[in-house]
Image (cartoon, grey):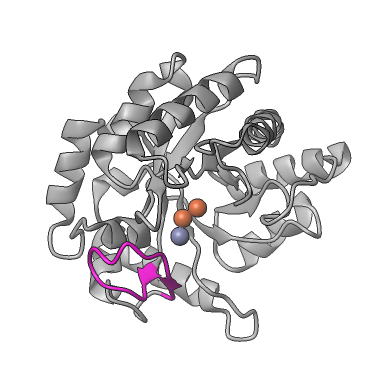
Amino acid sequence: MFIGAHLSISKGFKATVMLAHEIGANTFQFFTRNPRGSKAKALDDKDLADSMSLRREYGFGPLVAHTPYTINLGASNPDTWEFAVSTLKDDLIRAEKVGALLVVHPGSHGGQGIEYGLSRVVDGLNRALADSGENLLLLEAMSGQGNEVGSTFEELNQLMQGVKKRGRVGIALDTCHLYGAGYDLKNDLDGVLASFDRKIGLKYLHALHINDSETMLGSHRDRHANLGNGSLGMEFFAKVVKNPVFKQIPLILETPDDSEQSHHKREIEFLKKNSR
Ligand code: FE
Ligand code: FE
Ligand code: ZN
């Protein structure tokens, strides 16, 4: 299985692979650039090459890159939208060089309505996917906060159907977001996955964010908690890692961490132990 956490790459890719390995991970997620800004650091070819041989040596699975929160493909403002398209395009090319899947939040319609948001996001995806290599782009299922687009399987499917290059898009699920969106995966994981399979197709599922949630089913809020510290609970996560659907794709913790308490290390240990 591929289990990891969201980590900072401020010390470079090689150092991050070493850190991931130390905490028992064999994948990790990273921000392509400052999550609240726009500037991207140039890739260091030597560091990248070193990190790749280390990844092979340690038997790492695919990495996951995450776009910054400042990208909004649903924006009606032309400057905001153009910025989102060009940043996404750039990140697709960078993620391909690193050998990482790229995750993006579909966007927010800013009060213009869901139909407007869906078609605006589709236009943005099609623009970004033109001339940006071959990398796979994953749309993250959201909790449905505010005017978020892409918090139901129906909306996500509508986005996928609008993409001309169907082979370039997939889905990243997030346990905290799904629960917030109203999918009761805690009590009926198989039912939720069967519904995903009917409406989108399990073959399009390429990553899972594995987070407990501070809020309740259908809260439409997005508050990650450490495993066992939220409404989903340890029993649920033990079930997740036993499910064959999640045996092939990267599972990424986006839970609070504090290196002294090594939350991630303990969470990864728990997940690995329960997967057998
Ligand atoms: Fe995300
Ligand atoms: Fe997430
Ligand atoms: Zn979240």
Q: Residue at x 78, y 59 (%)?
A: 10
Of 272 and 69, nearer the camera is 69
Q: Is residue 245 magenta?
A: no
Name the residue: 58% across, 54% down. Answer: 28
Compared with 197, 209 (above or below) is below
**Residue at point 31%, 28% (across, down):** 158
Q: Is residue 276 visible?
A: no
Q: Is residue 218 magenta?
A: yes
Kindly identify the residue that appears in the image at 38 percent across and 74 percent down. Answer: 227
Q: Is residue 238 above or below residue 37?
A: below
Q: Nearer the viewer, residue 99 or 198?
A: 198
Query: Which residues, given as a range, are shown in magenta?
Result: 212-226
Q: Is residue 133 left or right of residue 205?
A: right
Residue that lies at the very extreme toward the bottom in this rendered image: 261
When asked about the image quadrant of residue 149, the answer is: top left
Across and down, in percent, residue 89 comes to 66, 28
Q: Height in image: 106 above or below 11?
A: above
Q: Is residue 139 visible?
A: yes
Q: Which quadrant of the figure contains the C terminus?
A: bottom left
